[in-house]
Amino acid sequence: MDKDVEKDNTAQTAEDAAPESKKKKFPPKIVIIAGVIVLQIVAAYFIQKTFIFKDATATVAETHDAKEEKKSHKKASKHGEDDGMKVVMLDEIVVNPAQTAGRRYLAVTMGLQTEVLEADKTIEKAQPIIRDAVISLLSSKLMDQLADIQYRDSLKLEIRNVINKQLHDTLVPQVVFSGYVLQ
């Protein structure tokens, strides 16, 4: 009888020990798989952030800057602080930058700032010639140049010079971008 009780106690302790060891051990396959999945998610996030959506981030920042510029211009106009400058808006210009084989494009909406009262009529009459000159200039630029934010100011100066050359006068002292989308 003691042997039967001993067998029962031994069987019982073996059964108790088995579930505890199963509870303590976590299957290593699951840990490895979960670790690989987490690493893939993190790597995909950083790849998208640094390589794929790099241009989109810049475009969003430029759009935000353009909105802030419009707000500050509206505030200045409300307070009667007009500096005598008039902006003549051109229609949107869409070009394929150099060496992109038509796979990328730049869409620009710009205004020509002027102090001359009758300049808007002159610009309106010459708009096809102005647009042609700007399209030729922009389509000759490389993607790296157009994507560089520091290059934008010199690009504005180049556009201004080309426009004034077409008008045979210095009617446009400044060019402003109200939209600049590079895809």
Image (spheres, helix red, strand yellow):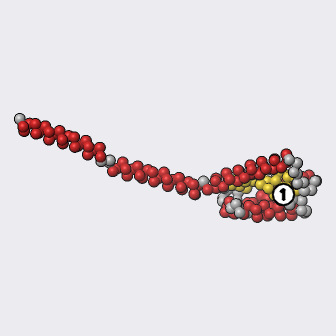
Question: What type is the residue that disc 1 sits on?
Answer: Ile
Q: Nearer the viewer, residue 66 or 18?
A: 18
Q: Residue furthest front?
A: 2
Residue 19, x across and y down, in percent = 25, 41
Residue 74, x across and y down, in percent = 81, 47
Give the structural element (helix, strand or loop) at label 1. helix
Q: Residue furthest left?
A: 1
Residue 173, x across and y down, in percent = 86, 60
Characterize the local packing of mark 1: few (<14), some (14-19) or many (20 or more) Cα atoms within 10 angstroms: many
Q: Residue furthest top?
A: 1
**Label 1, on which residue?**
130
Relative horizontal placement of residue 47, taking residue 113 as reference (left or right) = left
- Give the residue at x 79% y 56%: 176
Q: How many marks?
A: 1
- Give the residue at x 68% y 61%: 148
Where does the N terminus fall, quadrant-wise? top left
Relative horizontal placement of residue 73, taking residue 121 as reference (left or right) = left
Q: Is residue 138 visible?
A: yes
Where does the C terminus fall, quadrant-wise? bottom right
Instruction: Locate residue 23: give its quadrant.
Output: top left
Q: Nearer the viewer, residue 10 or 135?
A: 10
Residue 139, x across and y down, in percent = 73, 60
- Give the residue at x 68% y 60%: 147
